[in-house]
Amino acid sequence: MTSYFENVKKNFGFGCMRLPMVDDKVDYVKFCEMVDVFMENGFNYFDTAHGYLNGQSEVALRECLTSRYPRESYILTNKLSGPYFNKNEDIRPLFEKQLEICGVDYFDFYLMHSQTEQGYAKFKECRAYETALELKAEGKIKHVGFSFHDTAEVLDRILTEYPEMEVVQLQFNYVDYDDVAVQGRLCYEVCRKHNKPVIVMEPVKGGNLVNLPAQAQAIFDELKGGSSASYAIRFAASFEDIFMVLSGMGTLEMVKENVGFMKDFRPLNEQEMEAVWKVCDYFKSQDLIPCTACRYCTEGCPMQIPIPDLFSCMNTKKQFNNWNADYYYEIHTKNGGKASACVECGLCEAICPQHLEIRALLKDVAAAFEKKEEK
């Protein structure tokens, strides 16, 4: 691994998009406990973005990490997100605001956030990459990179046009490895071609690879070893040039479990890898909606449809076909935002990292849950 990343103690990082909450607010007491256990076990990498948890993630890191630990003891990654700037002159004020909110005077890593072909065009037009490199030269950023959600072809173009980028954050897990939309393997191979270390996001695919259906869980149970989360995270970390694997952790128990098997990391052996591919085959056979609940789609929805929640209900209905899915569909839509309310504006599809055909899927959800009353 490139020597300039030597201050990172381990190859497992704390993704701060999903944190412990109480009444829609981050629970600072619990998050402090989680940070302390994470740090005490030798891990020190934290990842956030300005829009995570409606702006609460950066504040929580200030309250629970940066105000409580020496600056040199942790690695903090933040991102430049497209919705928060419209021209080049907006970028520096936003960046300085992020530093202030996080309570630091520099970021260890600063990533151009969620790059797609469309988003990249805006970042280029606004000279966002050039501005980030200027901030690096000024010492306010240690390392510059980008997170990515598009095809391998687009990734290759960005790395060719901006070889100064030092790291790429990719969605990489065993279900998406050969997925034609996400192109996990192909994007990983592009990074290796350009000699760029990879940060992995969504190793457990938004929790979908943790709470497995019974048939899939039975495959891992036969190994008599770790949890489903451990196999998913270790899968991602087992590949060469994987610099960091992130996990969004919402409870202290999750932190303890994850640091437990990553503290003395072991790549998957042949038997474990075989089990992973069997689980992958099971998922492919279920025809589930591969939503990771990143919630990017909900931010601009004019009808305020809780799209990931409704997709989760649909997947539950497909897997278990019981009252539970219908019950939670009513819970999520009790104040409006049913699938049938979609006006098909397409804003959600333009920003979806999974490239889902959301408008068509919402029609399927409406058909499954919104049965017309019999006359």
Image: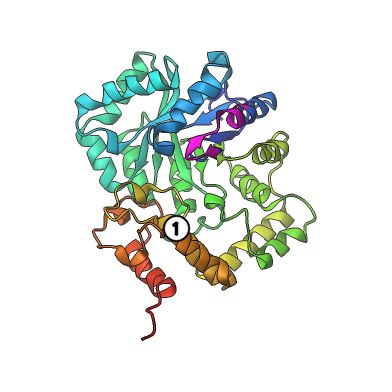
Q: Residues within 10 Å of mark 1 (few under 14, many from 20)?
A: some
Report the side of 65 relative to 36 (left or right): left
Q: Was residue 104 drawn as part of the magenta stretch in this picture?
A: no
**Residue of label 1:** 332
Q: From the image, which quarter does the N terminus lie in?
A: top right
> Measuring 35% from the left and 70% from the top, which residue is drawn there?
363
- In the rendered image, residue 373, in percent from the top left (x then y), is placed at 38, 80
Question: What's the residue type where badge 1 is placed?
Answer: His
> Measuring 77% from the left and 57% from the top, which residue is drawn there?
223
Report the side of 150 relative to 126 (left or right): right
Q: Where 313 falls versus 168 (above or below)?
A: below
State which region is magenta. Answer: 21-32
> Measuring 29% from the left and 63% from the top, which residue is drawn there?
342
Q: Where 272 falls versus 114 (above or below)?
A: below
- In the rendered image, residue 321, in percent from the top left (x then y), is placed at 56, 73
- In the rendered image, residue 277, in percent from the top left (x then y), is placed at 63, 61
SS type, badge 1? helix
- In the rendered image, residue 278, in percent from the top left (x then y), is placed at 65, 64
Which of the pair 104/324 is nearer the observer? 324
Report the side of 226 relative to 165 (left or right): right
| Residue 285 in view | no
Q: Was residue 27 drawn as part of the magenta stretch in this picture?
A: yes
